Image (cartoon, helix red, strand yellow):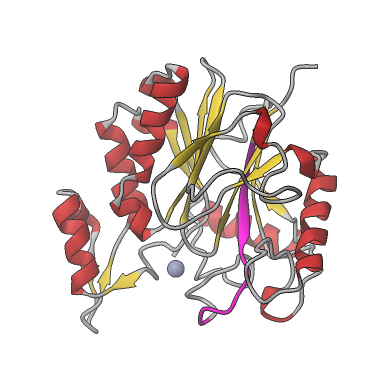
């Protein structure tokens, strides 16, 4: 059960039906455009109702494009300045530059599979997409660089969070103690059930994974992806107080957010959005 603040926030989201919600840890920085999309305010129908942002499902691509246009209008960010990942549950991160503007949305991609995007260029919006996986937002306010990473259970096993920190250190000389992290809505331990085989992979990979896991009466493991990610980030020198979370479970709240497990698999996807504003 989410805490009182989260309950209040969810009540407000159901009432106001915004297209985008703020991400704690990012929203405090006025120089960022940031957020995570809901299901509300789009034009898709049926299982994709309504703000589906996935071109690769059976949804009508013209409706998906219209959904992107609606987002673009609301954010004041042209589609030509957005860059979309190409997610395969891997851990590759693309260093995004001006040549990538519009790719995955209005232009063909020049890059292969990437589950993370990073840039130090203001005015380029990074876009990754989700239906239960963990969205990770990174901002270094000192070096002025951002990273947006998709960390599902496979990506978490591959330590996508740590790979993101390493990418920012390598490309932008970021210091871990400067990096701020926001964790968006995702399937939480209340709903993320796996068998012994997958649970065993986590316990082998991360010594701390078993501490927050629990086994249900039905014999399924409930794995806490967020906690595994947090603990991993600390090993890279990230400061605990610099990691914030929405604490919203996409499966519990599948009327608000697209959820793969909350819909029997046929559903749309939402998106994480992150950009540094151009200095005016
Ligand atoms: Zn849940």
Q: Quadrant of ligand 1?
A: bottom left
**Percent x, y of residue 234:** 29, 33
Q: Residue at x 62, y 27 (%)?
A: 29
Which image quarter is the N terminus in? bottom left
**Percent x, y of residue 107:** 73, 47
Residue 112 visible, this angle: yes
Q: Inspect the magenta stretch and tell me whether residue 266 lies in it.
A: yes
Residue 241 visible, this angle: no
Q: Residue at x 82, y 53 (%)?
A: 69
**Percent x, y of residue 142:** 51, 15
**Percent x, y of residue 109:** 63, 47
- Towards the viewer: 13 or 102: 102
Q: Considering only vertical position in the picture, is 184 above or below 15?
A: above
- Towards the viewer: 86 or 133: 86
- Towards the viewer: 20 or 156: 156
Q: Residue at x 29, y 53 (%)?
A: 157
Q: Considering only vertical position in the picture, is 45 above or below 117?
A: below
Which image quarter is the C terminus in? top right
Q: Inspect the magenta stretch and tell me whether residue 267 lies in it.
A: yes
- Towards the viewer: 214 or 68: 68
Q: Considering only vertical position in the picture, is 277 above or below 17?
A: above
Q: Residue at x 52, y 55 (%)?
A: 185
Number of disc labels: 0
Compared across the picture, whether 267 is left or right of 101 comes to left
Residue range corresponding to the magenta coloring: 264-274
Compared across the picture, whether 153 is left or right of 278 comes to left
């Amino acid at each position: 059960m989410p805490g009182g603040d989260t309950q209040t926030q969810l009540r407000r989201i159901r009432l106001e039906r915004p297209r985008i919600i703020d991400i704690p840890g990012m929203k405090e920085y006025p120089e960022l455009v940031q957020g995570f999309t809901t299901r509300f305010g789009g034009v898709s129908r049926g299982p994709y109702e309504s703000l589906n942002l996935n071109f690769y499902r059976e949804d009508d691509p013209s409706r998906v494009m219209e959904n992107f246009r609606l987002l673009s209008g609301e954010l004041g960010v042209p589609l030509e300045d957005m860059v979309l990942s190409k997610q395969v549950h891997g851990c590759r991160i693309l260093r995004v530059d001006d040549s990538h503007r519009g790719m995955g949305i209005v232009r063909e991609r020049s890059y292969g599979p990437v589950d993370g995007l990073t840039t130090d260029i203001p005015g380029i919006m990074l876009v990754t997409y989700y239906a239960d996986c963990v969205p990770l937002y990174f901002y270094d306010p000192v070096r002025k660089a951002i990273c947006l990473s998709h960390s599902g259970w496979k990506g978490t096993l591959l330590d996508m969070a740590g790979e993101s920190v390493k990418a920012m250190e390598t490309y932008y000389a970021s210091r871990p103690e400067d990096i701020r992290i926001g964790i968006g809505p995702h399937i939480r331990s209340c709903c993320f059930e796996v068998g012994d085989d997958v649970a065993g992979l986590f316990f082998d990979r991360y010594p701390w994974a078993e501490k927050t896991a629990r086994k249900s009466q039905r014999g399924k493991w409930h794995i806490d992806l967020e906690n595994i990610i947090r603990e991993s980030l600390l090993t890279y020198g990230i400061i605990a107080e610099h990691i914030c979370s929405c604490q919203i479970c996409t499966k519990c709240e599948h009327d608000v957010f697209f959820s793969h497990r909350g819909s029997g698999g046929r559903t749309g996807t939402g998106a994480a959005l992150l950009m540094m504003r151009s200095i005016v």
